[in-house]
Amino acid sequence: MTLSLSQRIDARIADLTRDRTVERIWAGDHSVWKPEPTEIVDRLGWLRVANDLRHELPELEAFARAVVADGFKHVLLLGMGGSSLGPEVLRETFGAAPGMLDLVVLDSTHPQQVRETEARLDLARTLVLVASKSGTTIETLSHLDYFWDRVESPEQFVAITDPGSSLAILGRERGFRRVFENRPDIGGRYSVLSHFGMVPAALIGAPVRQILDDAIAMAAQCAATIPTAANPGVTLGVALAEAALQGLDKCTLVLPESMKTLGWWIEQLVAESTGKEGRGILPVEGEPVGPVAGYGSDRVFVTYEESPRLRELESAGHPVIPLADAGIGGELFRWEFATAIAGAVLQVQPFDQPNVQEAKDAAGIILAGGVPDVMPINLRDLLGTVEPGDYIAINAFISRNQENGDRLDAVRRALARRHRVAVTVGYGPRFLHSTGQLHKGGPPSGAFIEVIDSIKHDIAIPGRPYTFGQLLQAQALGDLAALLGRDRRACRVHLEDLEAVAL
């Protein structure tokens, strides 16, 4: 007898209860995921970091007050992936409190975006926050080189990094205002409730105390003492993973306006954690809910609100997972725990990113003068291969601004209508640190459209033998080479050429 999705979920929860999975996660048992402990046992600090930061809250608040007292108005965050997306979501969710700093994130190497970001700031009154777990992130260090040459005082720089990293050493050598050394047992995409998220949150005057309290409350609901079937992290993670195992691997996020940008962070957390070994869950964020006829049979919807359209989808057989808002901190922890559970169900290691390095290595070869052997297919030919169950990923190595965003959204909607598949949009190199892992390590169901443009006004990077434009172009070509090296379907076009075909 074929089991329904709900029956499979119930059976899996029973298995997790029998195997004491939640208890073992809290005990740091790596064998929940893989026999080898590599990059698991030293990546579980996220389970308890909210408690740590709760105790440090007076110190963080005092640091923020001192920065404000010294006349700063902006904080420029230089970071990639988990180091930047969490803080950006908090800024978009809460804004900047009166009298506190406004946060601007730079996570692009496109010269136009570097220039547009700088134009938004009064550099003399800007605190530059350099965030990198490893301390070696090429984009972040290139940004640091650029702004170090343009900002007057080392007292305007702050670092967040692992203890003893090259960035920590550099920050002390150069006399940075502060070097925050984060718990080293937390991976980047699980770091939002650590210093990486809470230092910028304190600087913008976000309700850090409430964020941490909500996270701690959700952690208590996900504790080993809670019945597995009542654990909100388990139930979400099992539902997503079991759906994916049945071919419903497009996790479509339907978020209220107040939580809209949370999808940015969920996307990188879920995609990078689960997309490997030919398996994975593709989060679809920012897509408006359409009519029933517009969807294939590969969707599962996660929502925090009811609507007639969602009820129609559910009646038509599309699974809908309703969640009750537990506050931003609670949701951050819920999704972290759920993603860890999903990794266990899918039998993948959720704390590594084995295929991300492929694009980095290819970009490094190009920067050193190498020419990759790439033969992308034609855009029309690529679209002709799209079948039910596939998805289209638009990987745009262009400036992330309102005009480009509107144009890409129009293309996205047109392609989704025409092909009845999920269509995602990611900006490079930003997406390389999130969905880029799933693109290469997940199911071979993606059709990848790389969007490039012509660099008109390049920017030199002080002390480096390449410009921002050259770095961006190497990253774009490197990602294309990595995709084709994995036998993925991929093409590259200019945005106007994509619009001519799609619209």
Image (cartoon, rainbow, N blue to C red):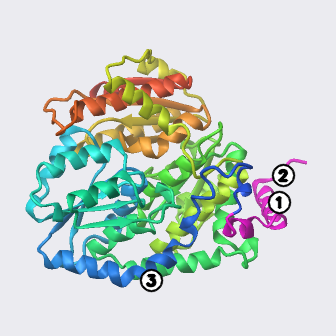
Which range of residues does the magenta coloring cover? 1-28
Q: Is residue 161 visible?
A: yes
Badge 3, how many Cα within 10 Å: few under 14, some, many 20+? few
Quadrant including the C terminus: top left
Nearer-N-terminus badge (2/3):
2
Are discs 1 and 2 less than 8 Å apart at CB? yes
Disc on res. 41: none
The residue that label 1 is drawn on is: 11
Residue shown at 31% from the left, 43% from the top? 139
For the residue pair 82 and 258, the one nearer the viewer reads as 82
Secondary structure under the numbered disc 3 in the rendered image: helix
Residue at mark 2 to residue at mark 3: CA–CA distance: 47 Å
Q: Is residue 172 left or right of residue 353?
A: left
> How far is the residue under mark 1 from the one under mark 2?
10 Å
- Between marks 2 and 3 in the image, the one whose residue lies nearer the viewer: 3
Q: Please name the residue that numbered disc 3 is placed on.
A: 55
